[in-house]
Image (spheres, grey):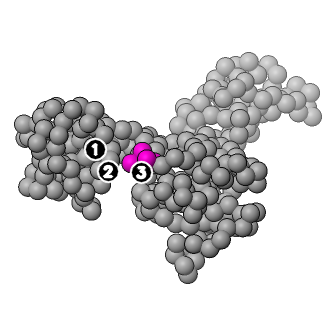
Amino acid sequence: MSEKASNQLILGLPKGSLEASTYELFRKAGFTFKPSSRSYIPRSDDPEIQVRLLRAQEMSRYVELGMLDAGLTGHDWIVENASDVHTVCELKYAKAGRNPVRWVVAVPEDSDIHSAKDLEGKRIATEAVGIAKSYLDKHGVTAEIEFSWGATEVKAPELVDAIVELTETGNSLRANNLRILDTILESNTQLICNKAAWKDDFKRAKLEQISMLLTGALAAENKVLLKLNVQDANVKKVVEILPSLHAPTLNSLSECDWHSVETVVEEQVVREIIPKLKAAGAEGIIELSLNKIIP
């Protein structure tokens, strides 16, 4: 990998299942990354950021070694690689939603394995060998763990007795007639950097900027800005209807007995409260989408 410029941040983004959602999150945060002829080096509209696309599984190793200044990867892969890195912030998003993903032990529905102790002497397939081994050690169990190159769910029961697999919704496990025996680890995406980058004034400031904008973009998910006008006599009734992050903002209009009201609300409640606001005397109601909310 080429020598890094001191006024640029080399940032790794996860290639694969998180790739699309990560690009969209950065777009909402104000950064645009586009594919280039070199597929692992997307173009960046920020001259202070160079982007590399890598599998999340190996991201923390390259960050720790200093080949990348920073990167986005799951907490699970940091644990799996035993990487000594600095966590800038936690970013609660995944492929299909905002809930943490889970590493679970799963067995066939009709298996006689019902506890961790029942795994003694069994064969287990997983991509996360280190995480699985730590789980077995915790429970004082000895079992054969084999690395799985993929399609892990289909290996039980013909090839292995159990699997340790990553799940977000559990749908794939159920589709393969597997039941969850235990949850080993929950994981969210993290923005990480190596210790040297965190000590560098420019890189730390850039990472703090990125962290603020990404967390702001996530905070704005499923929220909208409502703007409306209301006469003085109806302000109290209108404000009582409005949920908000804080008290709604009221500003006087040029007509002395009117106010404009602004507030941020969950998008799903808008359909319920707009008819109530109208009935309470609100006029000129506008709903605006949000990209970021910075506390």
Residue hosting label 1 = 132
Distance from disc 3 to disc 1, alpha carbons, whole Å, reads 13 Å
Location of residue 94 in the rendering, given as x and y in whole percent from the top left corner: 45, 49
Q: Mark on residue 128?
A: 2
Of residues 231 and 269, which is closer to you in this image? 269
Q: Secondary structure at mark 2?
A: loop
Residue type of the residue flagged with mark 1 = Ala
- Secondary structure mostly seen in magenta is helix
Q: Is residue 237 left or right of residue 24?
A: right
How many numbered dots are placed on residues in this image?
3
Neighbour tally class for label 1: few under 14, some 14-19, many 20 plus, Cα within 10 Å:
many
Q: Which mark is first along the chain, 1 or 3?
A: 3
Q: Is residue 22 above or below residue 80?
A: below
Query: Which span is picked out in magenta?
Result: 77-82
Location of residue 90 in the rendering, given as x and y in whole percent from the top left corner: 55, 41
Location of residue 88 in the rendering, given as x and y in whole percent from the top left corner: 61, 44
Circles 2, 1 touching at the beta carbon (< 8 Å): yes
Which quarter of the figure has residue 3?
bottom right
Location of residue 150 in the rendering, given as x and y in whole percent from the top left corner: 27, 61
